[in-house]
Amino acid sequence: MNNALRSRSPLSGGRTSDQNRRLHTLLSQLCIPIEEKAGLALQYSGGRTSSTSSLSGFECENLLDDLQAMWNRKTAKTRNAIIHYLCLLGYTTSAGTPDYTRINTYIRDIGARNPKAKILGALNLKELNECCTQVKARYEHEMKRISSPKAEAKLPYKDN
């Protein structure tokens, strides 16, 4: 967590519009219910308010730090699985590293599993899990197709 922000006085000004946007984006992405939002507001305001809109800039920044860390922990495994499967399908650079431009294009164009055409880092938990299911299914389909007798029959004949 950012110690510079933590050391500011709780009375050092109101929230910014950027803090509001980030707070509501993270709360939405984490699918946090209204009751839990009120509990978070009480916790981060020291019992002063149960409304996230009444948090000071300092309180909001502390909450944002913790929500971002929670988001990163919850989504890292699923994001890494998606990247892994797509790399196995060839979404890599010539150096063998993940090609994030192609990966984000694939995720954005995945269809019904991503109707708002978001990139990988912008998906909420539900969308992330649905995209992971879709990518895994595509990987499994490709592996079956490659290992099927029909695919082997199409390989060039090796003459002894």
Image: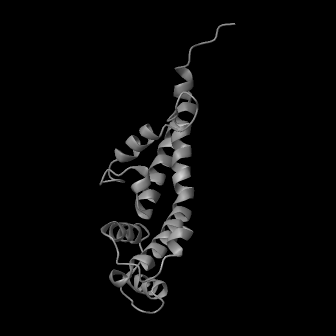
Quarter-of-image position of residue 156? top right
Q: Residue at x 36, y 46 (%)?
A: 108
Q: Position of residue 96 (x, y in %)?
A: 58, 32
Residue 118 is left or right of residue 75, and the answer is left
Tell me if 160 is positioned left or right of 79 in this view.
Answer: right
Question: Is 30 or 138 nearer to us in this picture?
Answer: 30
Q: Nearer the viewer, residue 7 or 139?
A: 7
Single out the residue that lies furthest toward the top.
160
Residue 24: percent from left, percent from top: 35, 71
Q: Is residue 16 above or below residue 157?
A: below
Say which residue appears at 44% left-offset and 57% top-offset.
Answer: 128
Position of residue 107 in the picture relative to residue 142 (left or right): left
Which residue is rendered at x = 59% and y = 13% of the image? 157
Question: Which quadrant of the figure has residue 159?
Answer: top right
Q: Quadrant of the C terminus?
A: top right
Vertical side of 12 occupied by 17: above or below: above
Residue 92 percent across, percent down from the top left: 52, 34
Q: Residue furthest bottom?
A: 47
- Check the image and name the residue furthest to the right: 160
Question: In which quadrant will I find the N terminus?
Answer: bottom right
Q: In the image, what residue occupies the spot 34% across and 44% down?
A: 109
Q: Give x and y (percent) for residue 40.
A: 46, 83
